[in-house]
Amino acid sequence: MQQNPIVGSYPPYPNASELPTDRATDHDTYKVAVGWSSLEPVDLYATNKGPFYWDVNQPVSNLEPVNHSNKELASLSNPEVLENKAPHELALHSVTGDSPSSQNHTFWPRRKRWWIVGGCGFLLVLIVGLTVGLVLGTKSSEYTTEDSNGSGNTPPANVTTTSSVISCDFKDSQIHRHILSAAALDSTLHIFARGKDKDIWFRSLEGQDATWTGPWKQLLGGGEAFAGPPTAITWQSSRINVFAPSTKGSNVLTAGYQSGAWTQNWENLGESVSTPVALCDLPEHLEHGATASTPERIDQWVVSQVTGSVIHNLWNPEVNDFDQPANGEAWDATMDGLASASMPGIVCSANDPAHSLLVYANGTDSVRLRHYQYETGAWDPWIDLGGRFRGDPVLMRTGGREQGGFNFFGVGMDGAMYTFNWTNATGLAYRPPITSLGGNFSSVPSAVVTGHRPLQIDVVALGVDGKIKHRAFRSGRWEDTWEDLGVEGMSAPLVVNYEVLSGSAAVNRTVVAFIGKGDQLQFASWESTENAAWKDLARWTGGGGNLTLDAMCLDP
């Protein structure tokens, strides 16, 4: 693909011929043409290539669904962060040359020639400036950057606005990975992100109208530096915990919220990790060989820097002493030496299988799935489901807390979205077929259950054209095409569905959030509804911030 008008360079998009192996393409979905995001930074230079040339640089909800019938769930299977640059940087360098040594009549032809050249150059610069200004002005009208408190354009306090490029690991040049997380508690949705200062920041939406409670704040008052994005979870109906890898040894740190207050300090859970933390809320359950139930807890899953495999820890603090871990820094291996090319995807349940773990295998990029059973107290063998995928897998529980049913979503090497559904009824050795949902994406997906009877699933992702796309599972089938939500983004989007109390009644709200221009949060929120097109419901607005687009960055 040639980038006009003059000279361009860009990272290659995935080869469209590289379909996941042994998987049929879904022909009921159109393919989005490869395109360029209008939010890319543009640098204008003068070099020996000519007067001017273009150098273009491409820059989880945990509400519990109710149980669904196996017939309804079975029908589900039948239908990276790019390098960060400061947005809109436009640098103009003039062509230099030797000036005349004298200003007499002898050099009049040369002076005239220079006046002509200078005049032409000025006109060219003026045309380029007007064109870029018109383009940027058009883009800025697409959504507002002002939030409800009038502070949408204000970066978090004490954060530099200078963008720096940090070398990021885990194939960041290939796909946008998740960098936002959210957790809901008491009708309030807390959104977490990493700032340009590498600290964890949060901002909260409250009430039926989803209004901001205040500006961005540094979690626990700041002072820490993190190598990767945060992951947040609500558990035991009254607690929130946030986990993130630190720049100090890439150890996992956690902070907790309970009874209206955050912990005073970050708790260090140890280990050197190379991915963000995947979390699951494990309900009260009966462990193998136990006679008494084990209380609800949080399980954490990451990839070890040392082994390249998935390791596991758990967090089960006492009610009145929730600074103390139950399994302090005792990480255990779960991968049997299988190297992972992705952040793990995990689903937990009160009944067998207790855990369903999925990764993309390093070297083949194929889907590998395994289950852990309470009954045996052991992991079953890995199941190779084939395909070739990039980025990270997304697993979403669809069978309720008492069941292990889930849906998988992932982006193939061809850029298309793929899915499969697994339920307890299919058996632990079941090899679910992976089905294409089509599309062409530059980010990992985010998915949420937005309805229960009948089951309703919504998936969002960033298209290669820089637009946020949406597709829904309604009335037992996937909608025919991906819906363009009419807004441009610079990160993987996050979709959340959470409960808001209004008097004695409860309503569900849907929020879609992502990082847009100026490294600021953009979002839309509406009351969850069935069958309505999201494009008609979304009213995009700014949430401020000065947030990094880096996913998992390990300083040299």
Image: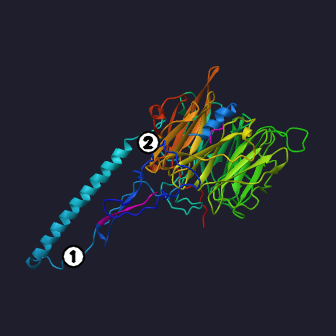
Q: Amino acid at mark 1?
A: Ser
Q: Position of residue 14 (x, y in %)?
A: 49, 58
Residue under label 1, please give it: 99
Q: Position of residue 223 (x, y in %)?
A: 63, 53
Q: Secondary structure at mark 2?
A: strand
Q: Residue furthest left?
A: 105
Rendered residue at 76%/55% (across/down): 334
Circles 2 and 1: CB atoms closer than 8 Å: no
Q: Position of residue 496 (x, y in %)?
A: 59, 38
Q: Which residues are magenta?
A: 52-62
Residue under label 2, please give it: 487
Is 54 within the magenta?
yes
Rendered residue at 59%/45% (across/down): 419
Quadrant of the image occupied by residue 426: top right
Quadrant of the image occupied by residue 294: top right
Q: Residue furthest top?
A: 504
